[in-house]
Amino acid sequence: MPTWGDILTELNAPENRLPNGQSDFDGVRRRYIRQLSELTGRPTIIYYTDWFGKGGPAASMTLEDMQGMMEVCKDVPGPALDVLLHSPGGSPEAAASIVRYLRTKYGHIRVFVPMAAMSAATMWALASNEIVMGKHSQLGPIDPQMVSPTWTAPARAILKQFEQAKKECRDPSLLGAWVPILQQYGPAVIQQCEAAEALAQRLVREWLYEWMLASRRNKAKQAEQIANYFASYEEQQSYTLGISREQARGQGVNVTDLESDQSLQDAVLSVHHATMHTLQGAAIKIVENHLGRAYVKLAQQIAIQVPVPAQGPLAGQFPPVIEAPSP
């Protein structure tokens, strides 16, 4: 099985150096994505963000990602699609837009979670027909994350804090401790939290019913059970602790073990490690397909890479980059 160190050794090999002496991160990563697609016989896209390193709002799933989906799905026919997903999540509305778009093009979607897909990324995974996870992989609660310029917190945690504040603020001696906390929240934050929770749960329930559980007799009951489990703040307690494949499978989620096919495991993890190495550079988000078409968000800009014919010994290896300032 290839490891992070194995891919690093490959990147440092002389044959994987660019003319300027730097490692050919793009070339190695694209080669492995292409090899994975050839192995499965299915179109393949990756959606990866550097939330372990750079993090911040730029790593979150937003409606802006629809541009990336449109880019990488161009000229990629259905009905099948494989998605490699590594993301902290973000906006449930953005996840809904991505799912709605992909489902207009692909009838069978398989989501691989090589490491972690949390929050809205878990919602995206649950909208698939099948999720493939390794022993180390994890999903997360779909409890929406409320984001401000200075903090990020689960919607349910905010609601529980307000309930606690209502009780304790009856004691005037405690008001001084609560006022600075409550002043951080904007107007209508309670309504926003409640609406976000309800939306995430409803979307997951509907997606499970329509796709992953479509052939099951009791699909309505199971969809409700799974959505409740992933949405339960009390059940999960920690946003980052994660939900293992055994826990997800125990709720009725259609999960396949990545280790059940050694060749597939090697191919998927090679893509994962190569992409994680790439993210140590300027890129904070990479959306790419097996044809080399990519939408890359950099720390300061967005680069759209479109493969076009070229002349000379490096033809086709290094697509031109069109750069535009990020919003």
Image (cartoon, helix red, strand yellow):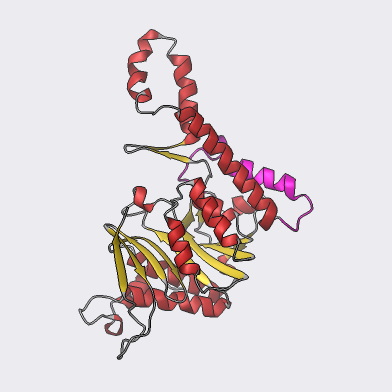
Q: In the current view of this chain or complex, which residue is farthest to the bottom?
A: 312
Q: Is residue 318 visible?
A: yes
Q: Nearer the viewer, residue 266 or 221?
A: 221
- Outermost residue to the top: 172
214 left or right, relative to 242: right
The percent position of residue 107, horizontal first and vertical second, equals: 64, 65
Question: Is 220 in the magenta?
Answer: yes
Would residue 119 be visible to someone looking at this image?
Answer: no
Q: Position of residue 193 (x, y in %)?
A: 50, 33
User: Which of the two residues, 6 or 267, is positioned nearer the viewer here?
Assistant: 267
The quadrant where residue 147 appears = top left
Q: Position of residue 153 (x, y in %)?
A: 42, 37
Question: Quick check: is 37 in the magenta stretch?
Answer: no
60 lies left or right of 298:
right
Q: Is residue 176 above or below residue 135?
A: above
Query: In the orientation shown, which residue stands out farthest toward the left?
Result: 20
Q: Residue 159 in the image: x percent, y percent?
A: 49, 28
* Residue situated in front as seen by the camera: 199 or 6: 199
Q: Residue at x 37, y 53 (%)?
A: 59
Q: Is residue 42 above or below residue 257?
A: below
Q: Residue shown at 42%/75% (left/top)?
A: 292
Q: Could you tell me which residue is drawn at 49 percent across and 33 percent down?
A: 192
Horizontal relation, residue 207 to residue 164: left or right: right
Number of callouts in the render? 0
Residue range in magenta is 214-242
Q: Residue at x 28, y 62 (%)?
A: 282
